[in-house]
């Protein structure tokens, strides 16, 4: 569904009974864009019209109109199968609360769901044959689902989880990252980028893990210095004598 707003069309997501937590986030954005979120979350109580000035009556009509507009958006943002749930509601907050209670659940039910999601997060491990991209997607979905219940997992904990749960192929790179980078400040996206670069090196050149890692720089913006190159040459020279022995 699209609605015209100041000459432009804004798409309103349709709720069919699934993924309510994602739908509600999208709807809140729609209401914010129209300055209607307070009518949905807090509601509007119509005051007594007796003794009002003309300006107050004008403001009253405007508020009633906005509340009806918010309710109309809600009514058109759900399928016909769900509409009977809110058919008798005459305010945006009333309809919004009915949907939240039925599809989002009580605080107790939500607490149980969060507990299950956190347990799945703690026990999730990367399978030996699983692709890195698939595992990252699987873990990210758990993190995002937890976030929808206002229980976000700290980024530092997600970084630690990834490093701890990778399969054995990534043991070397995980250990080096833990030693070379500050885990407290390392972002999930930065970590993913390093791991994917390492993974691509393995896949494109079919090299052993150790050799692939030697060609991978943890800081992609840095170039090897001439002094480092000399050190490598000197080390190789000394290695010849050791190899002969």
Image (cartoon, helix red, strand yellow):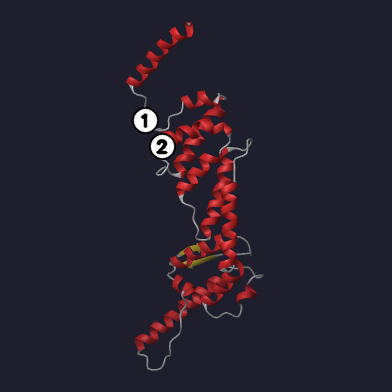
* Displayed quadrant of residue 230: top left
Q: Which residue is the site of mark 1?
A: 222
Indicate left or right for 38 with 106 as reference: left
Residue 197 visible? The answer is no
Residue drawn at x 48%, y 33% is 175
Residue drawn at x 61%, y 78% is 87
Image quarter where the N terminus lies is: bottom right
User: Which numbered disc covers residue 243?
Assistant: none
**Label 1 environment density (alpha carbons within 10 Å; few <14, some 14–19, many ≥20):** few
Q: Which residue is the site of mark 2?
A: 181
* Displayed quadrant of residue 83: bottom right
Q: Position of residue 9 (x, y in %)?
A: 49, 63
Secondary structure at numbered mark 1? loop
74 w.r.t. 152: above or below: below
Secondary structure at numbered mark 2? loop
Name of the residue lying farthest toward the top: 244
């Amino acid at each position: 569904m699209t609605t015209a707003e100041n000459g432009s069309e804004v798409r309103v997501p349709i709720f069919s009974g699934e993924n309510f937590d994602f739908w509600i986030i999208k709807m809140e954005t729609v209401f914010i864009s129209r300055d209607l979120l307070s009518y949905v979350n807090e509601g509007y109580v119509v005051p007594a019209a007796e003794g009002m000035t003309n300006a107050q009556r004008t403001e009253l009509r405007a508020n009633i109109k906005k509340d009806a507009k918010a309710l109309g958006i809600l009514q058109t943002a759900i399928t016909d199968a769900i509409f009977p749930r809110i058919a008798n509601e005459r305010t945006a907050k009333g309809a919004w609360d009915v949907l939240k209670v039925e599809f989002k659940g009580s605080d107790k039910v939500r607490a149980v769901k969060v507990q299950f999601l956190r347990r799945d997060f703690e026990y999730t491990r990367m399978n030996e044959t699983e692709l890195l991209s698939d595992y990252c997607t699987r873990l990210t979905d758990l993190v995002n689902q937890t976030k929808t219940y206002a229980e976000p997992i700290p980024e530092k904990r997600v970084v630690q989880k990834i490093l701890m749960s990778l399969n054995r192929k990534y043991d070397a790179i995980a250990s080096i990252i833990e030693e070379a980078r500050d885990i407290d400040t390392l972002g999930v996206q930065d970590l993913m980028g390093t791991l994917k670069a390492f993974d691509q090196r393995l896949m494109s050149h079919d090299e052993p893990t150790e050799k692939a890692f030697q060609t991978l720089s943890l800081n992609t913006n840095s170039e090897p210095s001439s002094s480092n190159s000399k050190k490598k040459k000197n080390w190789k020279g000394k290695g010849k004598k050791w190899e002969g022995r």
